[in-house]
Image (cartoon, helix red, strand yellow):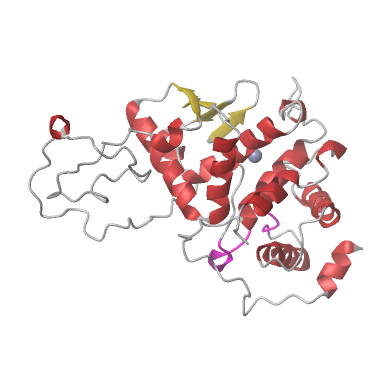
Amino acid sequence: MILLSILSAGYTVSPRLYTPVSTRSGVEDDDIIDGGWLDEVIITPDDPDPEPDWPDWPGPDWLDVEEPGYGDDGNLWDDLDYWDDSYVEEPADDPLVSAIQQSSTLTSSQQAKLEEALRKLIGEGCMQEALYNALVSENVKLDFGMKTGTAPAAYDPNTKKITFNDDVNITGESLKEELFHAWQDAYYAGGIGQYGKDAQGNKLPGYVNVEFEAKVFKDIARNLDHGCCYIFESDNIPSQIRYAYYSWIESIQNNTEPLLGENYMTWLNLFNQYHPEYSSPTNDNLASPLLLNILINSSNCF
Ligand SMILES: [Zn+2]
């Protein structure tokens, strides 16, 4: 019934009502499967002249540390007036990752990739940044490492570890989903391991809830001017359902419709129906989009 009322409300593709936040830097291609590989968006750095015609950098020994308040952007040149005597402190190698990292078995080059991936994710949009801030404020600490021969990226609630199966999958796109799972694991009572798979690989009740919330996060976090959506995009899904889902995401971004449990469950049930790769029995403990509303209400994204 709820879906019917959504459908009858009238869906328009153009013009799109959603006005992107100016700081958003673009969104990836569609057809994303959990942990799947996507091309990364190239984000143009703020510095218009990345190779200024300055004398050779004197090197760390030369640094006169006087300004501990160095920013997080990691670009030493940005805030530096070379001719001023007040040189800034050289930033740590991974200032963003270190705030959410317990340990890492990544190589130094992989760790640098991780830092860059996280920087891209945070810079991609307001909700992405809000997710990172939530992880930091909740003091979520993760392990990072590699795990070949498996999903491109994964979060293991038993070890609190995010793994990548290849260097090319150390991306902001991978982190977007896995960091959300990490936050779910930290927030929901008993963690999300209880909603995973059993020893035989069968999906346990609640599996679909956990995955659906992560997908909706990624969709409401995206810039719709670059397309939509992560789910309900397959050709075998009736077009009116695809359009209605788009319209629902758009209404959340436009703040014209609160993210209510009733509508949320309607879409969760449709997700369960049309995305068999994620389908499982639902779990009433996860019937409300609690984390999505926390992010929406604690940020000024919409
Ligand atoms: Zn997932």
Q: Is residue 162 left or right of residue 54?
A: right
Q: Is residue 299 above or below residue 58?
A: below
Image quarter of the N terminus: bottom right
Which residue is at 76% across, 36% downward?
207
Image quadrant where residue 287 sits: top right
Q: Residue at x 84, y 36 (%)?
A: 285
Image position of 95 (left or right of 234): left
Q: Is residue 168 left or right of residue 76?
A: right
**Quarter-of-image position of residue 185:** top right
Q: Position of residue 147 (x, y in %)?
A: 50, 25
Q: Is residue 244 magenta?
A: no
At a point 59% along the width and 41% down the height, the residue shown is 134
- Residue 101 in the image, given as x and y percentages of width and height: 49, 28
By secondary structure, the bulk of the magenta-drawn segment is best described as loop
Q: Residue at x 83, y 33 (%)?
A: 205
User: Quick one: quadrant of the C terminus?
Assistant: bottom right
Is residue 135 toward the left or the right of residue 12 in the image?
A: left
Vertical arrangement, residue 20 with respect to residue 82, above or below: below
For the record, the magenta segment spans: 223-234
Taking depth in this image into account, of 136 and 247 the one nearest to the observer is 136
Residue 36 visible at all: no
Residue 180 visible in the snapshot: yes
State yes or no: residue 233 in magenta.
Answer: yes
Q: From this viewpoint, which residue is outermost toward the right?
A: 1
Give the percent coordinates (x, y) of residue 292: 69, 49
Q: Position of residue 238 (x, y in %)?
A: 77, 64
